[in-house]
Image (spheres, rainbow, N blue to C red):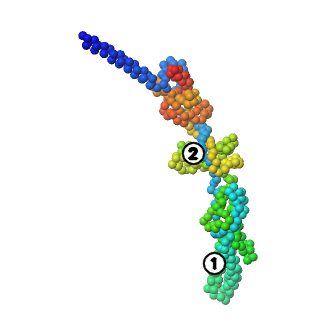
């Protein structure tokens, strides 16, 4: 009898514990249920005047925010070398100096410069003799006083000498000399090497006394008159950008000043980072801009096709944008979305929902209040 009493008491304790565990499980289950869904009755929906719709495609003046830097086109960058090697006699430029086209960059000297001038004057003098002999043989051949062979030989020597004089003349011009002004009185061992463009010296690789070879780069000169902005754009946006699109940008050292530009071209190549480059011509004055300067830019697209919803369908909660998606009859889930630009009462939806999902497009804040009040 005593044993039965003990067994009965143990069963009561186990039953009580089981009931407690079941209650705890029910409580945990209720607490783990999602709090971003709300269910209404048909009467509540009619009273709230909810309207269901889908994403719609429409044309908007879309703006893409991108980064990039100021760059110089290749034709405005010049690496300066000397066609014939020589010793630097004078070089006073430093990086940052402004130079004009035709101004002296450096003075070089070498014995080979003397030889080149001598060869030209000698060839030019011989050309005078061969031209006279050619004319004489031509006249003799016309009267049959000399043979055709002698006339052909005179013609060949005269033509060959003209080629030689012309080639030496071109070499002198490469060295910055004027062949027509060269004579026996102004042969020089030195030459003044001049700038081929106007701009600013960015690199100086020479000093007095240094020997430079034809393959050496003496100076690098940059012409800042045609700066452009090179912008980095992701592939998804690149297809919507066209030549002529307006661009505005700012630089870090002058964040209060806005510069205007327009798209010149989009590089038709996607890099490994899934980006491409957009080159833009700077329209406003480029005063204060330097190559390599980082820029923050906005590209305005012309009537871009975007997916959008009415502004009344977007709700804000804790600084984030949400929409209510119909999950079942009378049940709606609050889903986060990334909103873009707004135009004519419509807001672009960049991501978060798909076209086939049904969305509350009117009086969505009624659901937000119902959801948050229920949660509290």
Does 118 sit above or below residue 54? below
Does 35 sit above or below residue 8? below
Residue 351 seen by the camera: yes
Residue 38 lies, in percent from the top left, at 49, 23
Q: Quadrant of the N terminus?
A: top left
Secondary structure beneath label 2:
strand
Secondary structure beneath label 1:
helix
> Which residue is labeled 1 in the image?
160
Which residue: 72% across, 74% down? 187
> Which residue is labeled 2 in the image?
233
- Could you classify mark 2 by the number of other residues whose Cα lies within 10 Å: few (under 14), some (14-19), or many (20 or more)? many
> Is 119 or 106 nearer to us in this picture?
106
Name of the residue lying farthest toward the front:
2
Which residue: 64% across, 53% down? 72
In the displayed structure image, the side of residue 118 where residue 38 appears, left or right: left
Does 281 sit above or below residue 177? above
Which residue: 53% across, 22% down? 372
């Amino acid at each position: 009898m005593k044993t039965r009493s003990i067994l009965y008491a143990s069963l009561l304790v186990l039953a009580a514990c089981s009931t407690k565990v079941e209650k705890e499980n029910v409580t945990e289950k209720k607490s783990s249920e999602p709090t971003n869904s709300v269910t209404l009755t048909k009467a509540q929906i009619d009273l709230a005047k909810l309207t269901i719709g889908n994403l719609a495609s429409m044309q908007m003046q879309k703006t893409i925010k991108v980064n990039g830097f100021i760059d110089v086109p290749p034709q405005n960058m010049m690496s300066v070398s000397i066609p014939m090697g020589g010793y630097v006699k004078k070089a006073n430029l430093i990086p940052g100096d402004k130079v004009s086209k035709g101004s002296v960059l450096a003075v070089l000297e070498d014995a080979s410069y003397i030889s080149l001038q001598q060869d030209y004057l000698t060839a030019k003098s011989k050309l005078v003799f061969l031209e006279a002999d050619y004319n004489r043989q031509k006249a003799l051949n016309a009267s049959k006083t000399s043979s055709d062979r002698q006339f052909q030989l005179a013609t060949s020597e005269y033509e060959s000498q003209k080629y030689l004089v012309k080639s030496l003349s071109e070499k002198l011009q490469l060295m910055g000399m004027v062949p027509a002004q060269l004579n026996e009185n102004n042969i020089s061992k030195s030459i003044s090497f001049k700038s081929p463009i106007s701009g600013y010296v960015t690199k100086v690789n020479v000093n007095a006394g240094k020997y430079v070879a034809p393959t050496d780069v003496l100076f690098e000169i940059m012409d800042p008159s045609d700066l452009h902005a090179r912008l980095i754009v992701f592939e998804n946006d690149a297809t919507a950008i066209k030549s002529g699109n307006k661009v505005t940008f700012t630089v870090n050292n002058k964040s209060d000043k806005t510069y205007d530009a327009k798209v010149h071209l989009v590089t038709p190549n996607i890099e490994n980072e899934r980006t491409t480059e957009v080159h833009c011509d700077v329209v406003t004055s480029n005063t204060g801009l330097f190559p390599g300067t980082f820029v923050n830019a906005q590209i305005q697209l012309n009537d871009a096709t975007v997916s959008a919803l009415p502004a009344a369908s977007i709700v804000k909660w804790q600084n984030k944008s949400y929409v209510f998606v119909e999950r079942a009859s009378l049940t709606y889930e609050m889903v986060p979305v990334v909103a873009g630009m707004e135009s004519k009462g419509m807001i672009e939806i960049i991501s978060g929902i798909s076209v086939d999902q049904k969305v509350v497009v009117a009086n969505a804040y009624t659901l937000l209040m119902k959801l948050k009040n229920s949660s509290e």
